[in-house]
Structure formats: C-alpha cells, structure tokens
Amino acid sequence: MFDPFATVVRRINEPGTAAALRAAGPIVRAEAPAGGPVWIVTEEALARRVLTDDRLAKDPAYAPPSWDRWAAGLEPTAAEQPSLTTLDGPAHAALRKAHAPLFAARRIQGFADLIATIARRQLAALDGPVDLMADFTTRFPLTVICELLGVPADRVDQAVAACARMGAYGPSEFAAVMAAFADLAAAALEHGGMAAELRDRVPEGTSEEQVHYLLFGLIFASQITTDAALGFLVARALGDPSDDLVGEVLRQQPPAPFTLWRFTRAEVELAGVRLPERAPVLVDIAGINTAGAGADLTFGAGPHYCIGAQLAQLELRAVADVLAADFPDARLAVPYAQLRRVDRGMQGSRLVELPVLLRG
C-alpha cells in the first residue's frame, strides 16, 4: 500500500499518489503520520459535503486521544488559542467577520500596484543565475503581508526566519517561534496598519496574546499559501506557459494537497463507511482538482474557505505580469522537464530549486 504522506522527490510532471487514492474509492482509509487510521475523501461531491458538515470539527481537542500533539503537528486547541483554523460554528463566524473586511476582494485589489512594485523591486535586485526558491518565493509574500499588516520593513528578515523554523515542531521550538511571531505582531500593532484594525474588530474579550496568535496565523498562512505556488508559477511562465496560468497552477499544484485536519464529533457514516468518534478526516484537494474538469477546491469550501484567497491570487498574477513586462528575456537555466519537486505529504509540494536567468 502506498503512503500518501511520504516525502518523495519527483520530476515536476511526474504523477504523485492522487490517481491511486481515487482508484481506492470515494473515502480511503490510510495510516496517519501520528499513528492510527485516517480517512481521506477523494470524491468532489462528498468532499463538499464534508467541508460543510458540522459533525466534523476543526478543533484539535477532538483529535484521537493516542495522538501526540507534536508528532501530529497540531495547533493549540480552540480553548487554548482561538483561531480561524480551529474554531467552528458561531465562534468561528464571529472571528471570520472580524477578518473579512481586511481581505475583501475590492480592498485587496486596491493593493495591486503596491504588490507589483514589491515584486518588481525584489526581482530587479537579483542578478545572474539565481535560484528563486532559495529566497524570493518566501520573501515576496512575507514582504507583502508585513507591509499590509504594519510590520516594519526591517522586520521582514525576522518573519522569514520565523517561518523557516516552523518546520521543527516540538514544545521548546514552538514556544520560541511563537515568541518571534508575537514580537512581529506587537511591532505591527504599534504602526496602525491592518493589524491594528483587526485588533479593533475582534470579538469582545479577545486578549492581546490571542490577537498576536491571529496575526501569526495571517503571516504564516500568507507565506505557505503563496511560496510553493510561486515556484510552480514561474516555472510554468518560463517553461510551459498557458493563457490561464494562475488558475492552472493553483488547480494542478494547490498550496495544500489536503485540507487541515477535521475530526468526527461522534460516530459518522460517510459514503457507506462508518467512522468512529474522533476519527481524523482529510479531503484530497490535489487529487480532486485534477480528477475532472471544473473541480476546484484549492482554497477549500464552506465556512472555512481561505480568507486570503484573493491576496494569494493577486500576488501570483503580479509576479507573472512583472516577469512578462520587465524581464521579457528571462528563461529557465535548465529544461523545464528536469525541474524536481519534493512532495511532503500534508506540507505540500515545492520545487527543490528554480534556477532562472532573469535577463536571458
């Protein structure tokens, strides 16, 4: 039996495990990285039902009792630290309502020129053969979100370093990296940007520490949502372009191959399969997106639809447009088919390297 969570290096166009998962049925039992069974939904209609089913909770408090939080890479529970990714129901709706005006489509579109300027400035600073995965794909989205939130420009390096440290997950590492993000959040709150606006909008009783965690979520999610997709976007733009480049890249290489964990609140039946209480459930976003025409769960569905979807798409379009306008001679330093990606299970796929000659 294949392992959908294994870390594997493949050629950029080499198939992954999606087809094998789909062939196994609409809901597939596999071995979870933290131990025990996990059920993976591979069919679009069932996935959309799961994403709106209140019998499944996002709160890690419902995780299997045998799971070690650190081995599973779980967030704090909703009781420990309320967040958009762990709350459900009215509490989630109230918190999302506080975030929504900050990421409304019209408002985000108003930042188009700013985002294009950041992309142009960072790409123009690069010279000679350059690996864009080494710094640009991480630094660019973090520069954007820091600018919008009000994090001082001289703190972007701190944001880059903090995001890089999220790969090491344990009690001491988590505490240290949360302290770094809290420092960034505090700096943003002093400067009156969107961070301060969010603080003024969150539900009554939200503490300063909890606001810091919400800002951490925005910073880190902004990076992981756009970072990997930028690599695939630039590779396609220079090596295999198309008319709907941003849309195709996001559908074929979604930033998250699976949804975040959901857990059954009680025994549940899905597609004729009976799941026990506290069963972990995932939706195979990557597999569903590539299974049929029109399927697109890149940013999820239902009440937990990604609130930063507009920003991520705008960032990708900005880079594609700046490359075309300012670097017409840019090309890949290796043939497109030779590029390699590393598939990292729930952490998604990312190009190993992206060697580019920006000026031909």
Image (spheres, rainbow, N blue to C red):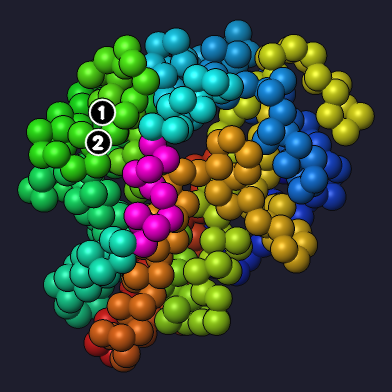
Q: Quadrant of the C terminus?
A: bottom left
Q: Is residue 226 visible?
A: no
Q: Residue at x 62, y 26 (%)?
A: 262
> Looking at the magenta stretch, what is its main secondary structure?
helix
Q: Residue at x 75, y 66 (%)?
A: 293
Vertical side of 98 occupied by 285: above or below: below
Give the magenta range: 99-109
When asked about the image quadrant of residue 182, the answer is top left
Q: Disc 2 on helix, strand or loop?
A: helix
When asked about the image quadrant of residue 302, the answer is top right
Q: Amino acid at mark 2?
A: Glu
What mark, if any, has residue 62 been given in the picture? none
Q: Disc 1 on helix, strand or loop?
A: helix
Which residue lies under the disc numbered 2?
A: 197
- Provide residue 93's location: percent of width, then percent of height: 51, 27
Residue 311 counted in the magenta span: no
Q: Amino acid at mark 1?
A: Asp
Q: Residue at x 28, y 61 (%)?
A: 111
